[in-house]
Amino acid sequence: MMEVSNNNSINYEELDFLVEILTKYPKESLKKISELEGIEYYKLKRIYDKYYGPDKYVQVSTIYNIAKIGLKSFVAFISVPRDELRSKALEILKNPFCNYLNASFGFKLGIAAYYHIPVDQVKYIDELLSKYSDDYEYYEVRGYPKRPRQFGKWNLSYDYAILMDILKEDARTSISKISQTLGKTRPTVKYMIERLESLEIILNYIAVYDDYAYNRAFVGIAEDLDESIIQEWIKRYDFHIGAIVPKGYLIEMYFTSKEDIGLKILEMSKYVNKFSVEYLDILRDINRWGKFSERVRRDGKGYRSILDF
């Protein structure tokens, strides 16, 4: 068991340990984890208190099957003049169907915006993006490896949207706190969570590094990739990959500004057809996750229009 460092610097061994233990026990209490793993409670708590939280480095988030609720995932690369970067980002973020965005410099100079779009509104994407720039391109992205999907629709009450926002931000939020927020009893909240799990809208709970741990990302679009290369990256890097529809891959590899960005580009660019470097810190103070409670109608009858914002 490692000791917590006495300063405020990031110790990545501690971060890796916390992510590993919370991935194994995403919702259990620290006392329960210490008992199950034979870890001294006070040491676990010191690491947890140092790194866990929305303004820190590690979060346990809820993984949703957005296809079940009628959403498709897209990434849009939007050309924006540098002096308009912040104002344009604020404009884009007014739309809750934008899940988050980053400053992006590469084959498009400006913003990479990640969207969840209702299936029946995909036809409006060009109209949406053209409000921000005349120069953009976008891709539908699904989980890797790509599998056939059937898309459902939103048919839950508005309270479920609020609950999903809470669990997305912090899956370790107590039932008591959620019940206070929703104005419902603890058994009702437990039932609602269990229902989302049984409907497979909630797929899993996962511990992840917050953007504060990394401030750069190499993002590449590849037409083809060898499976052995993908597996090697998974072992070596904090790395995500998505399958582009109908063909291709979206690669996201995270690192810090202390690492040599030129070497990262040299290493990775040979595998991709297009790439950019995302600066996760430039717009961090205004960035946010798109909220389900702002996407759905309060009467529970489906989604608002992506063009309403």
Image (spheres, rainbow, N blue to C red):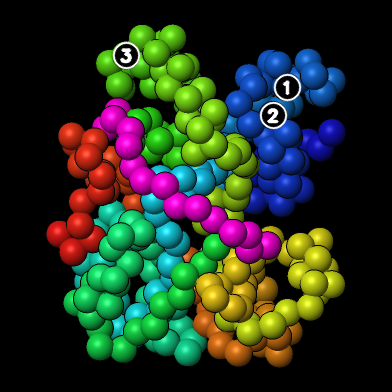
Q: Residue at x 54, y 56 (%)?
A: 149
Asked if labels 2 and 1 touch by Cβ distance under 8 angstroms, the answer is: yes
| 161 displayed left or right of 31 | left
In the drawing, does residue 251 fall left or right of residue 179? right
Q: Nearer the viewer, residue 305 or 101?
A: 305
Q: Quadrant of residue 156?
A: top left
Instruction: Identify the residue shown where x is 61% and y is 78%.
Output: 248
- Queried whether the magenta region covers residue 302, the answer comes back as no
Q: Closer to the camera: disc 1 or disc 2?
A: 2
Please, what is the three-letter code of the amino acid marked with disc 3?
Lys
Magenta residues? 145-159
To which quarter of the image does residue 222 belong? bottom right
Q: Earlier in the sequence, mark 3 or mark 1?
A: 1
Sequence-wise first label, 3 or 2: 2
Q: Which mark is residue 264?
A: none
Majority SS type along the magenta span: loop
User: Hey, which quadrant is residue 137 in on the image?
Assistant: bottom left
Q: Which residue is mark 1?
A: 33
Crowd tier of the residue under label 1, counting other residues whose Cα lies within 10 Å: few below 14, some 14–19, many 20 or above: many
Q: What is the x, y in percent for residue 236?
A: 79, 64
* Residue at the image position 63 percent from the left and 59 percent from the top: 147
Determine which residue is flagged by label 3: 184
Circle 3: element type: loop
Mark 3 to mark 1: distance in Å? 28 Å
- Label 3 vs label 2: CA separation? 26 Å
Residue 158 sits inside the magenta stretch: yes
For label 2, the residue is 25
Vertically, is 10 above or below 100?
above
